[in-house]
């Protein structure tokens, strides 16, 4: 899944007479520190399937859960940054207009050709994307974390990696 791209989420509730939903959180749920929801699907009883329409998500590792049973029904999934070669370098996009929750920022990491590890490129970014000027040929890899600027909760983890090869 790529950042900023709306998608359809078919959700099959197979529990007759039991309410479930899917919502997507930007960070880890806590007892008193539940992070903002990026998407909140309607709660409905089974047996029924609903095709949720989810707006574009920011890049990172995100949490999904059923708000009714969030202690048992939850999991994690990654949203990769979008990357493209441009005349100016490599355009890396990690969010979209109105899709970054208030107070949240991004760290952007790049692994350059020949490097053994990722290194921080942007720290605490409030932008939706930026362009990395490149000179060396080879493959550039990018990954993202999203977290509250006040560091009240840590990032859940890294986004999936997106790569661009420069010739
Ligand atoms: Cu549920």
Image: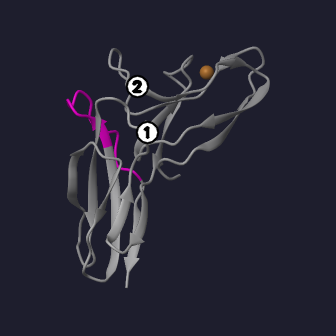
Q: Is residue 149 left or right of residue 59?
A: left
Residue 11 placed where, x, y %? Answer: 69, 33
Q: Nearer the viewer, residue 53 or 98?
A: 98
Q: Nearer the viewer, residue 152 or 8?
A: 8
Q: Is residue 67 shown in magenta? A: no
Could you give the CA–CA distance between mark 1 and mark 2, rounded to whole angstroms? 11 Å
Q: Nearer the viewer, residue 114 or 130?
A: 130
Tell me if residue 85 comes above or below residue 160 in the rendering: below
The magenta segment:
146-159
Q: How is the image coloured?
A: one colour
Find disc 2 in the rendering and name its residue. 36
Residue 142 placed where, x, y %? Answer: 34, 61
**Do the residues under discs 1 and 2 have CB atoms within 8 angstroms?**
no
Q: Nearer the viewer, residue 9 or 28?
A: 9
Residue 22 placed where, x, y %? Answer: 59, 28
Find disc 1 in the rendering and name its residue. 62
| Residue at 43%, 39% in the rendered image | 62
Residue 24 placed where, x, y %? Answer: 50, 32
| Residue at 32%, 72% in the rendered image | 89
| Residue at 33%, 14% in the rendered image | 32
Q: Nearer the viewer, mark 1 or mark 2?
A: 2
Image quadrant assignment for residue 14? top right
| Residue at 23%, 71% in the rendered image | 116
Q: Is residue 151 shown in magenta? A: yes
Q: Is mark 1 within 8 Å of ligand 1?
A: no
Q: Is mark 2 within 8 Å of ligand 1?
A: no
**Placement of the C terminus among the 4 image quadrants:** bottom left
> Element type at marker 1?
strand
């Amino acid at each position: 899944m790529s950042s900023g791209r709306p998608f359809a989420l078919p959700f099959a509730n197979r529990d007759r007479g039991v309410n479930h939903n899917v919502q997507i959180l930007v960070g880890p749920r806590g007892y008193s520190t539940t992070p903002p929801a990026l998407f909140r699907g309607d709660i409905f009883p089974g047996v029924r399937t609903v095709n949720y329409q989810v707006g574009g998500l920011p890049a990172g590792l995100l949490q999904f859960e059923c708000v009714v049973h969030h202690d048992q029904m939850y999991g994690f999934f990654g949203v990769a940054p979008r990357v493209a070669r441009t005349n100016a370098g490599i355009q890396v996009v990690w969010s979209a207009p109105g899709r970054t929750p208030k107070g949240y920022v991004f760290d952007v990491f790049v692994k350059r050709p020949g490097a053994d590890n990722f290194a921080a490129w942007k720290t605490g970014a409030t932008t939706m994307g930026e362009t990395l000027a490149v000179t060396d040929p080879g493959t550039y890899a990018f990954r993202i974390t999203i977290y509250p600027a006040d560091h009240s909760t840590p990032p859940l983890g890294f986004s999936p990696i997106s790569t661009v090869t420069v010739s």
